[in-house]
Amino acid sequence: MARTLYRFYLYAVFVAMLIFAAVGLGVVLSVLLSLTPLRGSYASAPSSQQLVQAVVFLVVSWLLAGLLGGLHYWLIRRDMRGDPEAGSSAIRSFFLNVTELIAAPIAIGIGASTIGQFGQYSNSSDLSTSIAIVIVMLALVATLELERRRAQVGPGVALFFQRLHLYGAQFILLNVLVGFWNSSMYQVVDALVLGGKGTGTTPCAGFVVCQGQNLLSNVVAVLWVVLFWLLYGFAGRSDSSSLLRRIAHYLSFAYGAGFVVYGAYQLFALAYLKIAGVLVLPSDFLNSYDFILSILLGLLIAAVYALWLRSGARQDPLARQMSFLIGEAIIAFLMAAAFFTGVALLLLNLFELPVSAQAWATSVALLIAGAGYIPLDINLHRRLRLAAAGALDARRGFIFALLGGGILAGAIGGAFALYSLISAGLGAPLDNWQHVARSGAAAFVVGVLIVAIYLWLANREKLFAGLGKRAAKSTPPAAAAQEVSAMPPVIEPAAGQVSPAPTMTNAPLTIENVLDELLAGKISRDEAATRIREFASVK
């Protein structure tokens, strides 16, 4: 315990002094960059007094950080030389990785925002401070990364902090990418597809000052985030055994696939409105029906994470097949969610006739965008019957997700319907309580339908089999010896005779029975492997 507290103290002071030195450098860089046109149109150049103050603060901060931080870093290095486990400790991993996890996304996000502001005629803000922050924070991240790579991280909690940094920062950058994609590529689509009609301004290209949006700066801002997002994915490429990595990548894959489904919905809604003769303005196209952005972003995210998942299982064909089936189950669930949402909205439209063309467009587009889940559902069922590797887990995950969604939709929808009806009956109606009651009733009906269908399928496919009992435990050596001694003796054949086929009389289990139960879906793949190992240990 004393050693742990000592290391906590060392790394806390060292990281704090490192941040203090970075602040001092950032102050000087901000003042120096303010001497350039980066200070904006209206900000005045810093005075000599401000420059002197910044330099003095830099000297003082670096002197203190060098003395105190250097002393504590020397103590850290001495601790690592004296104790081989110091370099792989959880304390070291926590301070280095968590600091990087916080600093890297902030620096990358501010950098993308700053790049996007270059060349904007209307921009009068001071970019010198934001550029200084980006430079200093990236330098801090680089320093911490070099220090982190000096020693191999240990197992357990220390490895968890490292994985939290790698996959947590990657997921944060994915969300930063989505934000900048929607804001920056909005201008690109407006310029290339609509000719500037969506925003009413004429964009320009190149890092030059222009009246409209600068397309090149917007594209570079997106590429800046993509670069670091891919670098973090490259950094974790060899960690194929990590459960946290697989969970983060499957969630991110679902994120991308969801954008593709959403883009398909936007496309079908726009097509319905066109067929119905509803006027769609260019601004409406970008604000409500920008399916191009959604589909392109979703395909980019889903393709990248599919490649990373595939590369993580490149040495195991069964793992690759399982990864493919889990991805198929994720896509099927997302499309099923869209489909049943469309069913609920279609039912609501029938309850509230007449409704607008936009309401019909939303429900019909969701139905069409999610209808593809039906062949995916059938394919997962077929793979289960063929006992493909991972088919049982993928099928279970898909059906259990739908059951959970159906239960939540039915419960919440029914609660809102009863709440609005009872309140109205007691003379205290909600605002627009009829719509609330009908919406809740539609959600309740669809939720009950989902639960009824997939509860029947789950029972029919025996997906609940084996979930209520634990996996078979290995037979203790004493019990195994008793079972072996209870078996009939093996009679050796005489010379020249053929040995009879071995038999297992009163055997507790056989490989054939295990395989039959596995193919029938009564037990999982892990349970089958455990029983076969038990059988082998008895033999």
Image (spheres, rainbow, N blue to C red):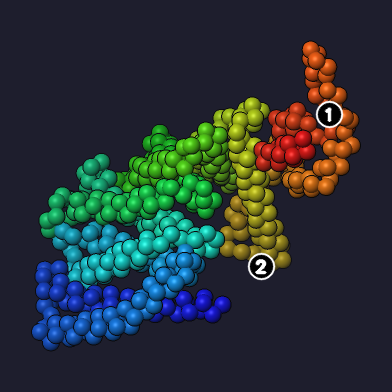
Mark nearer the N terminus (2 vs 1): 2
Q: Is residue 47 above or below residue 463?
A: below
Residue at numbered disc 2 = 428
Q: Is residue 36 above or below residue 471?
A: below
Name which quarter of the figure residue 276 lies in: top left
Q: Which residue is located at x 34 percent, y 52 percent?
A: 231
Q: Which residue is located at x 60 percent, y 33 percent?
A: 389
Q: Position of residue 43 (x, y in %)?
A: 15, 76
Q: Position of residue 199 (x, y in %)?
A: 25, 52
Element on which disc 1 rests = loop
Outermost residue toward the top? 496
Quick one: label 1, few (<14), some, or many (20+) residues within 10 Å?
few
Q: Is residue 99 left or right of residue 159?
A: left
Query: Which of 315 and 277 lies nearest the eye of the viewer?
Result: 315
Looking at the rendering, in which quadrant would you find the N terminus? bottom right
Q: Which residue is located at x 58 percent, y 29 percent?
A: 379
Query: Which of 3 and 249 lies nearest the eye of the viewer?
Result: 3
Q: Amino acid at mark 1?
A: Met
Q: Which residue is located at x 47 percent, y 66 percent?
A: 84
Q: Are marks 2 and 1 in contact (CB under 8 Å)?
A: no
Residue at numbered disc 1 = 504
Quick one: label 2, few (<14), some, or many (20+) residues within 10 Å?
few
Q: Amino acid at mark 2?
A: Ala
Looking at the rendering, in which quadrant would you find the C terminus? top right
Q: Position of residue 24 (x, y in %)?
A: 25, 79
Name which quarter of the figure residue 102 lies in: bottom left
